[in-house]
Each structure stands twice: as structure tokens, then as C-alpha cells.
Image (cartoon, rainbow, N blue to C red):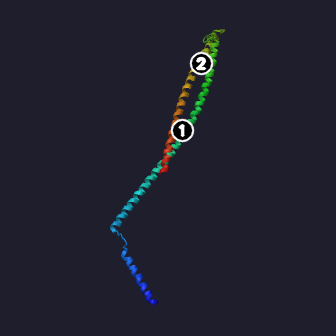
Amino acid sequence: MIKKINKIMLQMIFMVCLLISSFYVPKVEAKTLGQLKDELEDLKAEYEENQLQQELNEEELAKTKNRITQIRQNMTNIEDNIHDLGIQIEELDQSILEKQQEIEDILVFFQLANGESAYLEYAFGAKDFTDFIYRLAVSEQLTSYNEELVDQFKKDIEESKKKTQELEQEKESLKKEQKDLQSELVKINNK
């Protein structure tokens, strides 16, 4: 009897399996060999395109890195120029102050000595003709020195203005290079 029950159970299980399999229809997509070859060719083309793009990106990355190096070198050169110009401007300003003080001393002398007549009085105070020639030469040298001092004073002022303008241009150039560096760094980070 147990054997009969087992047999009946077995038959029922078999029937249930048949019923389930008759309702369940698996969906099968079969591809032809030609379709598989086409897919393979498409994948190969996509792979080659990706390889080419990667090479281009690496090349562009190397160019960007070189550009960054160049910008940093330019910035270093500009900073050196700014430093040098600052020193030159300080030296010119010191020279201007010294010449200005000397010119003021000469003006005080002229005011006390009644102007050009001081040189003439000095020249005519000679004891003989040789002393007169000597004193006249000294007076001419002093006059020439004073004129050269004033001319050099003016040139120093102009040179200081010019160097100050150069300094401002170098600072602007440095700012531009810093902006370029920032944009290149953004590029490289995006890559």
C-alpha cells in the first residue's frame, strides 16, 4: 500500500511538472553567426576608437603639463624681473634724493652769493693772469657740473617713472600668467 501511495504521488508530481512546463515557455533569442560577427566588429571599432581617444587625451595631457611648466617658468622670470626692477627703482630714488639735496645746497649757495656773480667774483679775485685762467676754468667746471647734476637729476626722475611703469606691466603680466596657470590646472584636473 505504501508502494501504491508512492506510485500515485510520483505520478502526481510528474503531472504537475508537465503542467508547469506546458505553461512556461522560455524566451530564447538566438543570434546568427553573421549577427555575432557584426557585433564583434562593432565592439572592435569601438575599442579602437577608445584607444585612439585615450592616446589623444594622453597627448593633450602631456601638452598641458608642458604648458604648465612653461607658465611656471615665465612666472619665475617675471617675479625675478619684478624684484630687479624694485631694486633699480630704490637705487634711482636714493640717487634722486641725493641729487635733490645737492641741488638744494647749490641753490642756497647761489642765493647767499647773489647768483652767477659769485663765480665772476671768484674769477676776478685772481692775483695774476695765470690765477685768473685757473679760477675761470674752475668756475666753468662748477657751472658745467651744476648743469650736469640737474640734467642727471631729470634723467633719474624719468628713468624712475619708466621703471615704475615697467614694474606695473610686469605685475599685470604675472597676473595674466597666474590666470593661465589656473585655467591649465583646471584643464588637467578635468582630464
Q: Which residue is mark 2?
A: 146
Q: Secondary structure at mark 1?
A: helix
Sequence-earlier tag: 1 or 2: 1
> Residue 189: percent from the left, percent from the top?
50, 50
Which dot marks residue 160? none
Residue at (53, 43) in percent of width and height: 73
Q: On the rendered structure, is 24 left or right of 88?
A: left
Q: Is residue 94 above or below residue 64?
A: above
Q: Is residue 37 above or below residue 186?
A: below
**Alpha-carbon distance for marks 1 and 2?**
38 Å
Q: Which residue is mark 1?
A: 78
Q: Are marks 1 and 2 in contact (CB under 8 Å)?
A: no
Residue at (61, 14) in percent of width and height: 139
Q: Is residue 44 above or below residue 138?
A: below
> Residue 143: percent from the left, percent from the top?
59, 16
Q: Nearer the viewer, residue 147 or 164?
A: 164
Q: Secondary structure at mark 2?
A: helix
Give the amino acid type for the residue marked by disc 2 in the picture: Asn
